Amino acid sequence: MKEINQKVFEGERALFKAHDLNIKNSTFQNGESPLKHSKNLNIEHNIFKWKYPLWYSNDIQVSQSTLKLEAHAGIWYTKNLKMDDVMIEATKTFRHISHSELTNITMSNAAETLWWCNDIKLDHITARGDYFGKNCENVVVDHLKLSGNYAFDGSKNIEVHNSKFETHDAFWNCENVTVYDSALVGEYLAWNSKHIRFVNCWIESDQGLCYVDDLTLENCSLVNTDLAFEYCTDVNADINTTIDSVKNPINGVISAPAIGEVIIDDPDIDKSAVKINVRRQTA
């Protein structure tokens, strides 16, 4: 590979269709789309200061680099991307990317980031911003720390491990989501979704877990969670804390040490289709 070292690039499409390059210690500034339609690049210790740095690219490795605030909508329509140890200050950074791995990334302004992406691995990501992960498919997440509302709206085939979410309306309109060993804080968790499973999770969610088809919770804590499971079907919930209240589940089994209140006030619900197991006297 040809090496480019300690260069400053300006102007639109500065390295248009660049390929087979090792770009080190360089800065891209004052010019849109500097690496558009590029392929087979190794980008190390670079700074991107302007819009659309990597669009329609393929086989890209980025490490120890920074996308500044003005590097808006930075990486779209790109395949086979590997990023490690990168700081991203810009919004809307990933859209329509596929078959990619993002590791050790900090996104301080991640609003509307990671949309319409598929076959993605996220490992040790810290992100702050609303609408993270919208309409994605086939995503495996490990050690994500996310602060921002409406996470993973409309996504499918999502697997999450060892993560922390501070977000309301997370996992709405989703299908096939499994979350392991994670903490989730925020109202209205996982409404209007199907095939949702939480394992060993700690959850605080006002009116969380409603309108879900096929909902499983295994060894989970539900703290400060009321009016849970409304109009949920095929519920299998094994809870190890008191549930404040349960309202109008359609069918399934709910087990907990205590439930503050069980509300079945819809005359169309068959009470015999719902089994409530309280393992000790309700306070």
Image (tube, rainbow, N blue to C red):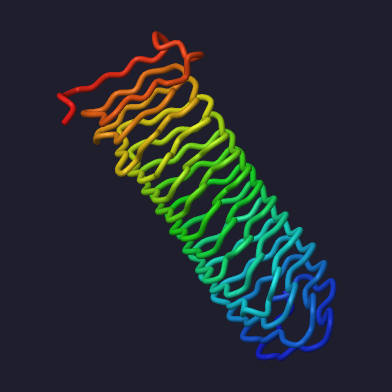
Horizontal arrangement in the rendering, residue 183 relative to residue 7 (left or right): left
Horizontal arrangement in the rendering, residue 1 relative to residue 87 (left or right): right
Residue 134 % position (x, y): 63, 50
- Compared with 274, 102 (above or below) is below
- Compared with 190, 131 (above or below) is below
- Compared with 228, 155 (above or below) is below
- Where on the picture, by quarter, is residue 94? bottom right
Horizontal arrangement in the rendering, residue 231 relative to residue 263 (left or right): right
* Quadrant position of the C terminus in the picture: top left
- Where on the picture, by quarter, is residue 68? bottom right
> In terms of depth relative to the viewer, which is nearer, 196 or 180?
196
Residue 31 % position (x, y): 79, 84
| Image point (62%, 86%), residue name | 25
Residue 130 % position (x, y): 56, 59
| Image point (24%, 36%), residue name | 241
| Image point (77%, 66%), residue name | 55
Q: Residue furthest top?
A: 272
* Quadrant position of the N terminus in the picture: bottom right
> In terms of depth relative to the viewer, which is nearer, 237 or 260?
260
| Image point (26%, 31%), residue name | 260
